[in-house]
Amino acid sequence: MIRLQNIEKVYRTDTVETLAINNISLDIAKGEFLSIMGPSGCGKSTLLNIMGLLDDPSKGNIVIDNQDINRFTDKKLANFRNEKLGFIFQSYHLINDLQVLDNVELPLLYRSLSAKERKELATAALEKVGLSNRLKHFPSQLSGGQRQRVAIARAIVGRPQIILADEPTGNLDSAMGNEIMDILINLNKNEGTTIVMVTHDESMAQKTHRLVRLFDGSQVQ
């Protein structure tokens, strides 16, 4: 589902050159649940952003679902990202002025769907994460765990084949973190969603199919 070939990422300023990702090649199978671990600053989030087509590698090739991403125009890349990928972030990235239902609908605004269709899909996604009774609430009225559930609903509302999760349990206590992991595991098991998760939590990583470790931008396991 995802193939990274000799990926390198260098950040440059006038005086400093930083190698964030160093020659990483990685194959992730369809339906796999992969976790990425490593110390802070080792390149985990950079690698996830490259997989999610949010950042360009300095070198290397990306193939997703047998599509050579390097050949895409900006418009095709944006459409592909919207249709194929769902994103979950540690800090939720919800819009506080929008109700829960409207937050979840956001990825669908870029598709040719009616308002009724968007509402139906968003409601169904919120039902999957156990928040069908919170549609009209605002993010500020929710707990951290509930906000992360909204973020997951937003990630899955467009029925993506791949979910990329950056520390999805990082701001939560262990009980709520386990609940979020259960939702991700069920999505992977029951719907065949391919999931790549960055985490600092070894216990969460051990619940996934495979663990990749990074150190100073290089893959060490």
Image (cartoon, rainbow, N blue to C red):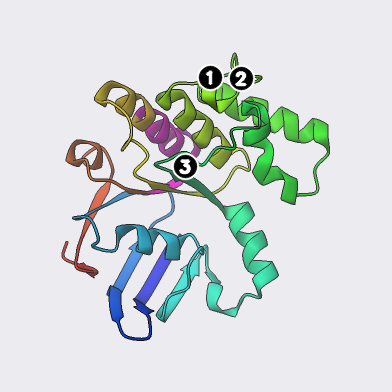
Looking at the image, is 12 positioned above or below residue 195?
below
Which residue type carries mark 2?
A: His
Q: Residue at x 64, y 20 (%)?
A: 135
Magenta segment, which residues?
A: 182-196
Q: Position of residue 7 (x, y in %)?
A: 36, 76
Q: Position of residue 159 (x, y in %)?
A: 60, 42
Q: Find residue 11 and report its image quarter.
A: bottom left
Q: Position of residue 45 (x, y in %)?
A: 35, 57
Q: Which residue is mark 3?
A: 192
Q: Find residue 125 and report its image quarter.
A: top right
Looking at the image, is 149 positioned above or below residue 161?
above
Q: Position of residue 186 (x, y in %)?
A: 42, 31
Q: Which residue is mark 1?
A: 141
The kind of secondary structure element at disc 3 is loop
Q: CA distance from mark 3 to mark 2?
A: 30 Å
Which residue type carries mark 1?
A: Gln
Image quarter where the C terminus lies is bottom left
> What number is the disc on residue 137?
2
Task: Give the mark, 3 or 1, whose residue is nearer the N terminus.
Answer: 1
User: Mark 3 or 2, which is nearer the eye?
Assistant: 2
Horizontal side of 54 relative to 29 (left or right) equals right
Q: Residue furthest bottom?
A: 14
User: Mark 3 or 1, which is nearer the eye?
Assistant: 1
Circle 3: is it few (<14), some (14-19), or many (20+) Cα within 10 Å? some
Q: Residue furthest top?
A: 133
Horizontal side of 210 relative to 112 (left or right) equals left
